[in-house]
Image (cartoon, coloured by chain):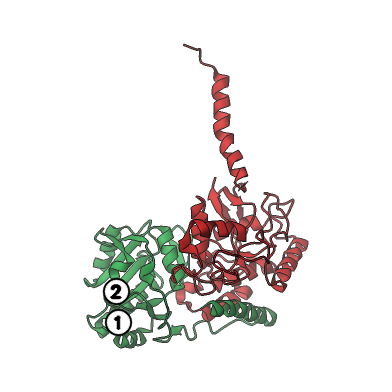
Chain colours: A green, B red
Amino acid sequence: MARSTREGVAAAFALCAFSALMTAGCTDRHESGERAAGEHAGEDFSVYDLNSKWQDQAGTARTLSSLRGRPQVLALIYTTCTAICPMTVSAMQEVESKAGPAAGFVLVSMDPERDSPARLAEYAKQRKLSPRWTLLSGGPSAVRELAAVLGVKYRSVSPTEIVHTSALTILDANGRRAAQYSETDAVDRAVRALQQLPR
Amino acid sequence: MSPFRPERSLLAAALVVLLPGVLFAQAGMVRVPAGAYVPLYSNTPGAAVGVAAFRMDVREVTRGDYLAFVRAHPDWERGHVRAIFADAGYLDDWRAPLDPGEFPSPDSPVTSVSWFAARAYCASKGKRLPTVDEWEFAASASETRRDATRDPAFVRRVLALYGARAAKAMPDRTVGFRNVYGVEALHGGAWEWTEDFNSSLVSNDSREGGGTTRHTDFRAVCAGGAIGASDPENYPAFMRFAFRAALNGRSNVRSLGFRCAAGT
């Protein structure tokens, strides 16, 4: 991992220097946003080692490790988002209908100030989310940490809008990242990744 | 009963107001007054973002400082640190878990520390990491001006400092200059962590499904260099954004250190 970070940084400069010189747009931004299932296998850390404090849509205090025990499909969203979040949630619902009952589904709010547990409960109702869904609200620091581990980037650009990368992350039963997809059309790949995980 | 002495109250009030400033100055921080700056990338290119007054460490955290932290917090020793908080490169240039080695000197900036580690260090001092906005705002200043980013000579000088940094195996905190706020070597020592390093996105493209994998991000940032940047001349800022985009919270890089900040 250490080496790949350094090479990654070097590659960033190489790529950027190249494109700056050529003033060529890097037009293939949407290409290959997928991480193959199993690519993260062997990661030696669990997201559940983060000891941040959260509340779910019922107002119950939660830790991330309370999600342990079955695979989880997780995404960071915010409930007033009208751009990509609704598609992310729809994609997760499709994964749920295709993958069967073995997995859980987690939505983490990037806008904890607005997304209180009550607001999350309302959202769950609106979107007809099943009882297998956990919606989490935590402090700004907790959200920043989780995003830093998952490689999700976000930034408030106005009082009502957060720009962010979209990612569907599949965690195994112990919170290790099994796969991650950046496109909302990754439903079938996500379903296959889930089916390959030990139950 | 002594009569009310307004001058005494004033004196007391002045002490209450001034004393913390003196104490903080002793703790190696300076106050950066409120202002505004134009971020390299934003949803409304060219629009200034307000930055509230804050305090910033004059210098980067050194290897000596970090050794003291690790001694007091064994959870952050190399070999003990939890994998979620740092990848395998954590402090890997130290001779031993409690020995940074003789070269570079204990006064050099500590590097090969993850974002989680940098945050934990700052928290242990009652501080925090600066935000990207705070860091960029402070780093816009030269020795004499609060915003020198439109000065071609300043931009060239910063680029030269980054070039010198890239040529060295290890950063040296004595390289660089003390800016108008009294903050030293923001451009000269190491690259520096920020609290929201993972907020660098290319304007609003990312809402439309920009990738989250590293390579995808590089391309997004690169494309933004041509399209979305508010000031294409500010190449040093572009380099910093590209650098941050390549990181995650567990990353350890030999040219990446940090300094802490705090509210006023």
Is the Cβ of the residue at disc 1 closer than 8 Å to that at disc 2? yes
What's the mark number on residue A110?
none
Q: Amino acid type of disc 1?
A: Val
Badge 2: chain ID: A
Residue B35 in the image, given as x and y percentages of width and height = 61, 50
What's the mark number on residue A95?
1
Residue A183 in the image, given as x and y percentages of width and height = 42, 81
As displayed, is residue B32 above or below residue A149? Answer: above
| Closer mark to the observer between disc 1 and disc 2 | 2
Q: Name the quarter where the C terminus of chain A is drawn.
A: bottom left
Residue B39 in the image, given as x and y percentages of width and height = 60, 62
Q: Earlier in the sequence, mark 1 or mark 2?
A: 1
Question: In the picture provided, is A15 more to the left or to the right than B162?
Answer: left
For the residues labelled 1 and 2, the Cα–Cα distance comes to: 10 Å
What's the mark number on residue A105?
2
Residue B96 in the image, given as x and y percentages of width and height = 57, 69
Q: Amino acid type of disc 2?
A: Phe
Question: Can residue B133 be seen in this snapshot?
Answer: no
Q: Secondary structure at mark 1?
A: helix
Q: Secondary structure at mark 2?
A: strand
Tell me if mark 2 has few (under 14), some (14-19) or many (20+) residues whose alpha carbon lies within 10 angstroms of its own: many
Question: Can residue B117 be seen in this snapshot?
Answer: yes
Task: Classify residue B174 by image quadrant.
Answer: bottom right
Viewer-nearest residue: B188 or B154:
B188
As displayed, is residue A59 above or below residue B162? Answer: above
Question: In the picture provided, is B143 more to the left or to the right than A144?
Answer: right
